Amino acid sequence: MSSPQVTVIGAGWAGLSATYHLAKQGYDVTLLEAGNYPGGLVAGWKTAGGRAVEAGIHGFWYPYRNIFGLVDELGISPFTDWTRSAQYSPQGLEVESPIFQDCPPLPTPLGTFLYTQFKRLPLADRLSALPLLYSIIDFDNSDDAWKRYDKMTARELFQKFGVSERLYKESFEPMLLVGLFAPGEQCSAAACIGMLYYFILAHQPDFDVVWCRGTVGEKIFKPWCEAIEKLGGKILTGKRVTDISLDEQGNANAVICGDERFETDAVISSVGISGLQNIVSSSPTLGRRSEFANVMNLGAVDVLATRLWLDRKVKIPRPSNACFGFDETTGWTFFDLNALHDEYRDADATVLEADFYHANQLLAMPDEAVIAKVQRDIATCVPAVGEAKIIDSAVVRIRRAVTHFAPGSYQYLLPAETSIPNLFMSGDWVVTRHGSWSQEKAFVTGLEAANRVVTQLGKGEKAAVIPIEADEPHIQMMRNINQGLRQLPWLG
Ligand SMILES: Cc1cc2nc3c(=O)[nH]c(=O)nc-3n(C[C@H](O)[C@H](O)[C@H](O)COP(=O)(O)OP(=O)(O)OC[C@H]3O[C@@H](n4cnc5c(N)ncnc54)[C@H](O)[C@@H]3O)c2cc1C
């Protein structure tokens, strides 16, 4: 008997995750990718001159337990050790983070507050964050919590809880610009609390981070794709999906790429928001269904990734750095690739990456103007960079790249199951109760979609998804009390 056929659309973290699991379970699985190589937003490639570039440097935070499990399973060791990071403003160094897991453990969020080394921000401003703890307790990632907080902006949330203007501007807004890719007045308060809790507040070591020792494409996706192909999975690039065909019962029976048709027993969509909007626009089948038509209400954010090769070695104090206060609504980070990438470890020249989020206005600038700005801005933080000559550079513009968790967007985000019984959704923007974010979320939702296929088609085992680490006991206790109070009719 032949194996059931499954078609996965989009070869980022989510699509590769679903494809890998189904290939392991013996499904006849085909992954269709519109681009020329797999990887999605994390893909890396070589310039015409043979230099490695990627669509932004990607960190892997302490809670990324499923991704860390994957690299162990693949038998690869792509990551650096845990690294320390710094934060700069036009006034200079503002914050340095320790490696939190090396500090004596304290009940959350004490470690985050006490061990983070603020250079300028007064204690009174830092203490103004304390009332926010109530929202952390109250927001438990449930559907109900998302509905309660999603229509409020993150800016309003911080105002409501009395966070000082300085703490907001110098700490929370920079975190939003790099964590949710948008300024506070454009972010959902629900997404803001969920993201801050996952990356920073749930457990003391959560903000610890590792990086790939080369491009993620080379270090992780290449061996991963080879493993998928060895299992019989097919990864087809240059295949842009335009429609989904349904049988008379309303089940998907084929995925359409222009003139090509891929017969299928189930479909997993792993495309980003703009990718799905393009498919919906060209698909009468999906455009007719309100859940898919409503995806057109969602937004995505522009990002810009730049890489600079300098003519000399410059000492960069920390390998990863976040910056604020340079452009009103744009956040940015810069990285010392000599410290992170094996390829540049012993180079005589310095290789820097600077990535800009919510970079709308920068996308319109010519490359030379972008590179001049990048050098000027990094030199504000590390003056010796301003004295170096740039011998090569790359600018990557990615329009409508990353998910915009805008206020009020939750109602239009899709869950894993759709009105087409054998079409499942995955990706970093799809609703899941897992609690993870970004790459880890994309990977997890891919596994969750594969598990739904296993349940429906009945072949093989489900993937074991590692849950996020449980809340600390005092947080659990406060959540239980809060939930009890919410159920009282006069308080709920
Ligand atoms: C500059 C930058 C920095 C980031 N930093 C971090 C970080 O430090 N840590 C972190 O965890 N996350 C980070 N992220 C976010 C992270 O990249 C994403 O969360 C993650 O890659 C999303 O994966 P995905 O599989 O959901 O979607 P994607 O990576 O967007 O993959 C979707 C795929 O679908 C394909 N596709 C679209 N339309 C079609 C179609 N019609 N037919 C076929 N294929 C199609 C696309 O080509 C793409 O390959 C960053 C993102 C950017 C841009």
Image: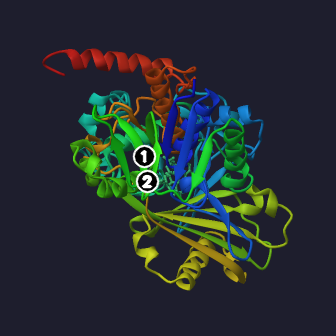
Q: Look at the image and tell me in which quarter the N terminus lies.
A: top right
The image quarter containing residue 299 is bottom left
Looking at the rendered structure, the kind of residue marked 2 is Val
Query: Which percent across, then down, holds residue 477?
Result: 41, 16
Residue sitting at x 19%, y 22%: 492
Residue 1, placed above or below residue 112 = above
Which residue is disc 2 drawn over? 241
Residue 27 horizontal side relative to residue 168, left or right = right
Select label 2 or label 1 by which is in front: 1
Query: Which percent across, then down, holds residue 212?
Result: 70, 50
Residue sitting at x 76%, y 57%: 341
Residue sitting at x 66%, y 75%: 383
Q: Does ligand 1 reach within 8 Å of label 2's beta carbon?
A: yes
Which residue is disc 1 drawn over? 255
Asked if residue 103 can be seen in this view, the reply is no
Q: Element at badge 1?
A: strand
User: Which numbered circle lies on residue 65?
Assistant: none
